[in-house]
Amino acid sequence: MTPAESDNAVADATNVDTATENPVGTDSSTGASNVVTRREMLAALGGASILASPAESTTDLGESDVHVRVYPGRLPTYAWARYGWRGARSGWAPPHEAAYNAVESALEQFDRYRTARGRLDGVDITVERGGRIDLTRHAISAPRELVSPTQQQILDAFRTVLHDRGEITGSCCHLLLWWGPLHHDVGYGGTRSPNSHVAKIDGEGAQTVANIGATELWDSRAVTKNMAIHETLHTYLSSRVANDVVGSACDHDLGTAIRTDDHTLEVSPIATAYAGPEEMGAGTRFHGTGCHDHGSFARHDGLDGIERFNYTTTLSEATLEGMTRYLEATLE
């Protein structure tokens, strides 16, 4: 998904004066709620970084039936300073930790759902931390790729690093937490082609990226969590199961946008960036450019009178059913 950033975003970087409800990195459930300072915008265009040391996964490379490995990407120095240098030694900054915990929670929800229904018995589920990723030191070398990489370039480079480490095994979903607040071609994230689903290419697994730099700088910690879950879910959903569950071939339509009062919508992870109107600042700061149809959502309570969007890490039942059916088709 690529947020539709305006063409003059960089040109206007020194004239940003955005005052909104919540500071960056809070645990608020609302989106589009950050103060972006002039210094941060300038720093987002470049600057030194903490170079990751050679990293190892915190667990071995044994495969589970449902296996997600989450990797913290390189952060620039200004981002570490933004979070008070918390996690600098391990490479896991607060947004990395929040994203990892959210993904872990999502897989726990799936485990409870399939267990309660007596489905996928005996299936093992693992969510683990992967080693730190610094693509600038490994796989991205062209100057233009460093300044303005495409989503495919990021994902191809990520896959190269994983291959060099010997971590492309089984049907693992490899999630990279990327920091690129001005990388509009990366957007909020996406999956790698051609292996966008964990079982699409035998032995390859799937690589996916969530742009936590975009969510943290332009939106909120709640959106960071949901987009990490969102991009993970894409590797376990398909147009076929989405059509079976909600009558739409778009997996975003498995999500929900539920009114909690007259002026608030609560948005589930797979619907994040797609639940609002197609305009800047409507829900998430940027609207997703992938498929969606509010009329085909598992539930969408409409936009009339809506002034506020909250984000919940609770998966919709349709999402859980879609993931269950996908895995039943690929594992059994």
Image: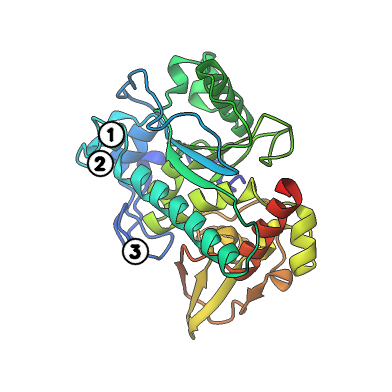
In the image, what residue type sits under mark 1?
Answer: Tyr
Give above or below for 276 relative to 204: below
Q: Is residue 18 left or right of residue 204?
A: left
Circle 2 SS class: helix
Assess whether mark 3 and mark 1 are in contact (beta carbons under 8 angstroms).
Answer: no
* Residue 200 shows in the view: yes
- Which image quadrant for residue 170? top right
Most foreground residue, 17 or 120:
120
Circle 3 SS class: loop
**Mark 1 vs mark 3: in front:** 3
Give above or below for 267 relative to 100: below
**Mark 2 vs mark 3: in front:** 3
Residue 202 placed where, x, y %? 73, 31
User: How far apart are the two marked residues, 2 and 3, measured between alpha carbons?
Assistant: 17 Å
The residue where tag 2 is placed is: 82
Q: Among all residues in the image, which is located at the extreme bottom?
A: 262
The residue where tag 3 is placed is: 28
Residue 310 placed where, x, y %? 45, 69
Assess whether mark 1 and mark 2 are in contact (beta carbons under 8 angstroms).
Answer: yes
Circle 1 SS class: helix
The residue where tag 1 is placed is: 78
Q: Residue at x 47, y 44 (%)?
A: 127
Give the mark nearest the N terminus, 2 or 3: 3
Q: Residue at x 54, y 26 (%)?
A: 158
